[in-house]
Every structure is written in C-alpha cells, then in structure tokens.
Image (cartoon, grey):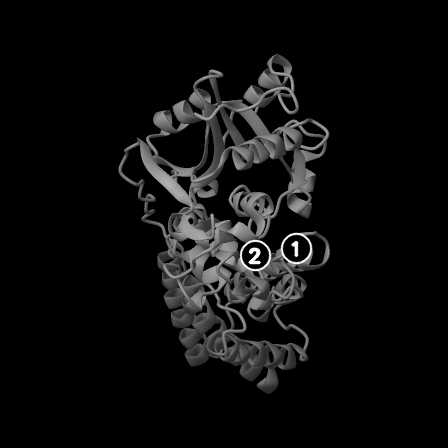
Amino acid sequence: MIKKYAFLLFFLLIFKSLQGQVQLSVYSEISIVTAGPGTELYEAFGHSAIRVKDPMLQLDLIYNYGMFDFNQPNFYSNFVKGKLLYSLGRYPFDYFLASYQQDKRWVKQQVLNLNQDEKQAFFKFLEINALPQNSNYLYDPYFDNCATKLGDITKTILNKKLVFNDEHLPKNQSFRQLMNQEIPWNSWGSFGINVALGSKLDQKATAEGTMYLPKYVYAIFKNSTIKIDSKSENLVKREDILLNFEEITPKKSIFSPLLIFLLFSIFGIFITFRDVQKNKRTKLLDFTIFFFSGIIGLLIVFLWFFTNHSTTPNNFNFLWAFAPNFLIAFLLLKQHPPKWISKYALLLLLFLSLIPIFWLLKIQEFPIAVIPLLLLFAVRFWFLARKNRYN
C-alpha cells in the first residue's frame, strides 16, 4: 500500500479531470501492475494497481485504490470499528515506481489486450472514480480492497467478452488458508490476525474470491482470455518486469509465539503438578492465565459485536479466550475463591473439548501457536475443578 498520500492531494490540484476531454491514442496501454510483498505486516500481501500510459499524450498515470489518510477525522477510531475509508489515488507512475524501488520490492505489469474503445472505457471509468466526490470507498481487506477492485473494473468494462480462468489457482482452500500462506505462521502478526478473525474467513474461496490477494490477481489475468471477433485470445498481451528484485522474506523473531507459549505452558504444567503434590494453589499462575485469556476474550467480544468488520463475528476463539475470565482472575487472587469456581472450570474444560471438533470439521481453524496454551489451560482447569471440589 502506498504511503505517500500527500501525492494524491498535490496532483489532484495540478491535474484537472481528463475525462470527456482527452482521447487516448492507438499507442496507449492499460496495464495491471503487481508489486511484491514488503517487510511490514500490511505489506505482506503485495499490492495491485492500474497503469494508463500514452506516449503520444505524454501521459503515464497510476490509479491506486490503496490510498488512505491518517489525517482523516476519527481515522483511528474508524479503523478499529471497521469503517476505514480508502481512496482511489491518481498520480504519475514514476512516483509509484520510485516508492517500490526504494523498498527493493519487485514490480511487474501486464499490458491488457484491448481495442481502442475498451482502453478509452477503462480510462473514463478510472477518471470518473478518481474525482474527489467518487474516490472514497469502504475498505474490506478480504472482499473490497486494492486487488479486488481490478477484477471488478475489468468485468465491468469487458462484460461477457471476459473469461476468467482459474485452472492455475489453489482449489478448495479457505480465505484463512490463503492468507496464512502469505504470513509466517509462527509470527505475532499471524497469531493476532488469526485470533481476531472469525469463522467467515474459513469459507472456501471461489476463484474470484482469491483475488483479494495481488498474487492471484496476477495469476488470473495471466491465464484468462477475451473474445475478439468470435475468437478467444489472451487477456494479457505482454508482461514486463519493471523492477527485478528478489522477493522479500519476512524476518523471523527469536521470541516467536510458539516458543513463548511453549515455555509458559511447560512452566505452568510443572507448577500445577507441584501444587497437586503439595496440596496448594499458586494464585499468581491462575491470575495470569485467566487475566490473559480474559483480555483476549474481551477483544473478541468487542470486534464481534461492536465493530463493522465483516470477518470478526462468529469467532470461536472465545472457546479458549473467554471474556468472563477477566473478572474471574481477580477472584482467584483470594486464598479461598467461591466454590462455584469448580463448576466454572468444568465449563471451560467443555469449551476446550469443542476446539478439536471445530478444527477437524473445518468450522474454524485456530492459531497453531496456541496449542501449548490449550494444553496448559486443560491441565489447570482440571486442577481448579478438582481443588475447589474437595475444598
């Protein structure tokens, strides 16, 4: 996603709308531009945009649906609530390419096999949508983003002439599985996303559904066709490598989620068995487990019920991150917590037992890194149910 939003404002002042005033020449080209992944989490999926180039008119513009403005009113609160406005930015292609040159990310373009009317239609559509009154849209990272827009626009312009080919796309994979292929599974970013997003992400992605990822936009356009004079021809006339960098591999942290949770779980299980032997209860361990899971549970509840994010409802991570645990944590600081805590612990054990069922039935996949925590929780909840029952 482009960071330099100031370019949009600058060039909107410099360039008046060309729609209805300029006719592209026969030398013009409409291209799908795909950029490789970057180092930041929000850059991990790459980027897609549309380029309009006409050497006769000395015109070379990028139309970028990945623009956002940190200075928008209530930007951060809207982001949390799922009401983030993105914009279509229109500015010289050189600035777009320079940004990726600086970040050392590869960039490829696919020049579309269009006739003159179709080129003009693309240009007109983009110009109208780049106007200030039309440029904003409600962003959805999986169903309406900078990549999905390109397929939608192409279908709108070419209509029945376009035949998308999905033979080279992954089959029977969910939105979550496709996403997890782009982010290292044992990273905090992957853990956070997979905890925050619900079961909608576990639906099977259709061919066009995969186009929320730029790499699949590239693949679909590469293999699709267009009908020209009753004949089927390649949708892409030519491919060009504009920046030829090696693909950036994400950095791995020593303190990964799996390592941290594994060490904590080993420690917690050791403490639990020692508590059993000494007939005591380590209050700090109980507080830590319940406070941590309760905090995550509250986040899940907030994202599920109080935001407009399309993929946060129906999040079965609540089976291990149960929001009421936040309050129970403080009760467990007492030397003698209420006796009903044993029944509460049994309820939590029941919740944990449902997780492998939901996982195997593919109702929802859970973060792999959380498995050591689930083992610790099961051992500790069993201990609490037993301890309180006999005391």
- Classify 104 as above or below 185: above
Q: Position of residue 294 (x, y in %)?
A: 61, 61
Amino acid type shown at disc 1: Leu
Which image quadrant for residue 389?
bottom right
Percent position of residue 104, x then y: 32, 30
The residue at the point 56 percent across, 26 percent down is 90
> Is residue 156 toward the left or the right of residue 240 in the image?
right
Q: Which residue is mark 2?
A: 196
Q: Residue at x 52, y 66 (%)?
A: 202
Q: Secondary structure at mark 2?
A: helix
Return the x and y of residue 311 as percentages of the image width and height.
61, 58
Answer with the quarter of the image where residue 71 lies. Answer: top right
Among the 4 quarters of the image, the one containing residue 157: top right
Q: Nearer the viewer, residue 109 or 120?
A: 120
286 lies above or below 303: below
Q: Is residue 31 visible?
A: yes
Please tell me how crowded label 1 is: few (under 14), some (14-19), or many (20+) other residues with Cα within 10 Å.
many
Q: Nearer the viewer, residue 162 or 378?
A: 162
